[in-house]
Amino acid sequence: MAQLWGGRFTKETDQLVYDFNASISFDRRFYRQDIEGSIAHVTMLGKQGILTKEEQGAITDCLRGILADVESGKLPITEEYEDIHSFVEANLIERLGDTGKKLHTGRSRNDQVALDMRLFTRDQVVRTDELLGGLMEVLLGIMKENTETIMPGFTHLQKAQPITLAHHMGAYFEMFKRDRLRLHDIYERMNYCPLGSGALAGTTYPLDRDYTAELLGFYGATLNSMDGVSDRDYLIEFLSALSIIMMHLSRFSEEIIIWNSNEYRFVEIDDAYSTGSSIMPQKKNPDIAELVRGKTGRVYGALTALLTTMKGLPLAYNKDMQEDKELSFDAFDTAQNCIALFTGMLSTMQFHKEIMRKSAAGGFTNATDAADYLVRHGVPFRDAHGIVGRMVLYCLDKGAAIEELSLEELKAISPVIEEDFYEAVSMETCVNTRCTAGAPSKQAMEQAIAAGEAYLKTAGM
């Protein structure tokens, strides 16, 4: 058992206890962050004269060698070590001798693990932002191509008013834009360096914490050493943001699943993102969309677990906080894989535009516009609402759409109706007379697309 703290103890830790306490099986993922943090720490120790320049150079070179050997596969990270910090330091000492033992000067595992987790999470925030950017590019492309693709808009899963596919995709564009804004906000708040906080009360060594922070790309050092080692707010915030992203993806997936059904047939999912049935040869199942919808609960679970872990912890560091990793890593992987796969599925999906248009026309989605027509001809809105309701009942009995009724039939329902009624309730008119900001008209959507393009040009971290 490779341990760095055995001096206080007179007998070996029980193997079951050791295994229960160890974290190498999962914290090996941030070997790079641990080594980069150690290099920055040693560089600062050399600058401050705590280490000689020769010691600093030797440790730095050796750490870089360890990193290269790990990444090439020459040096495997094995479970004989308690954690990733023990692995790195033990290999450093084995290669460098007593000089390697000076690496941990002015540092505790508490601030070391706080740094590693923050660096790793920061990388994941940036990666998630990049993936969302790719998804938004696909959405914007669909929007550009479909400003005149009419489809029904829904409330309560019932056809409500005609919109366009561009308008529908634009709603998700706005959701993912908010997600990216949340990620940027998290990055700004978390980007402060805990290294130098020590176990909880700093250190007597003359560390330059701001220099270390600068070397690692932070805005500065954390301002309270107890908070520095025990803060996981940034991780909770990121898991919360991932949960909202997954909720958005799950809503989108639900719609794609519905649109893919035989009853709707709005979309054709590419074979690469579908599977068949083991006994029903006609089936083409939207498995990726269903899995994205299903995996949302895993990310929610990670957030709930960490909130529960942290809720009763006194200051400062407690071993409970080791539980911040496994479920978080799973949530990072799950959310990022879902974004990537969803982007691929969406980019290869075919939209059945004629079926969408017929669905809008056959669902009385122009009923509101029929009522608006009557209002413009002097009928009070409440009366117009009732008249159009009777018109819909008549159409249902006849098996026809509103615009398919003859002028005589329409005038029998309301004498104010004239020939211009047909133009007023056409799908194109219903969509394109809605020109207010955020509405589905081609004019409004072109403005939204231009704003989306401008956003994507400046949205990266």
Image: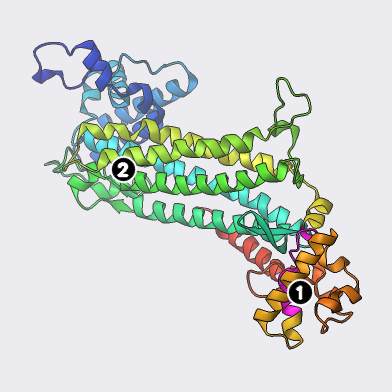
Where does label 2 land, which residue? Answer: 307
- Which is the main secondary structure of the residues drawn in magenta? helix
Residue stretch rendered in magenta on the structure: 360-373
Q: Eyeballing the image, is 230 above or below 82?
A: below
**Which residue occupies the foreground of this view, 221 or 395?**
395
Q: Based on the picture, tell me whether residue 362 belongs to the magenta stretch.
A: yes
At 65% from the left edge and 52% from the top edge, which residue is drawn? Answer: 137
From the image, state whether disc 2 or disc 1 is nearer to you. Answer: 1
Instruction: Measure the alpha-carbon separation of dots 2 and 1.
Output: 52 Å
Q: Is residue 145 left or right of residue 422?
A: left
Q: Cβ–Cβ below 8 Å for labels 2 and 1?
A: no
Q: Quadrant of residue 141?
A: bottom right
* Residue 298 % position (x, y): 45, 35
Circle nearer the N terminus (2, 1): 2
Assign a secondary structure to mark 1: helix
Mark linked to residue 370: 1
The residue most toward the bottom is 378
* Residue 197 % position (x, y): 20, 43
Dot 1 surroundings within 10 Å: few (below 14), some, or many (20 or more)? many
Q: Amino acid at mark 2?
A: Leu
Mark linked to residue 270: none
Q: Amino acid at mark 1?
A: Ala
* Residue 214 % position (x, y): 34, 49
Q: Quadrant of residue 446?
A: bottom right
Q: Is residue 55 left or right of residue 387?
A: left
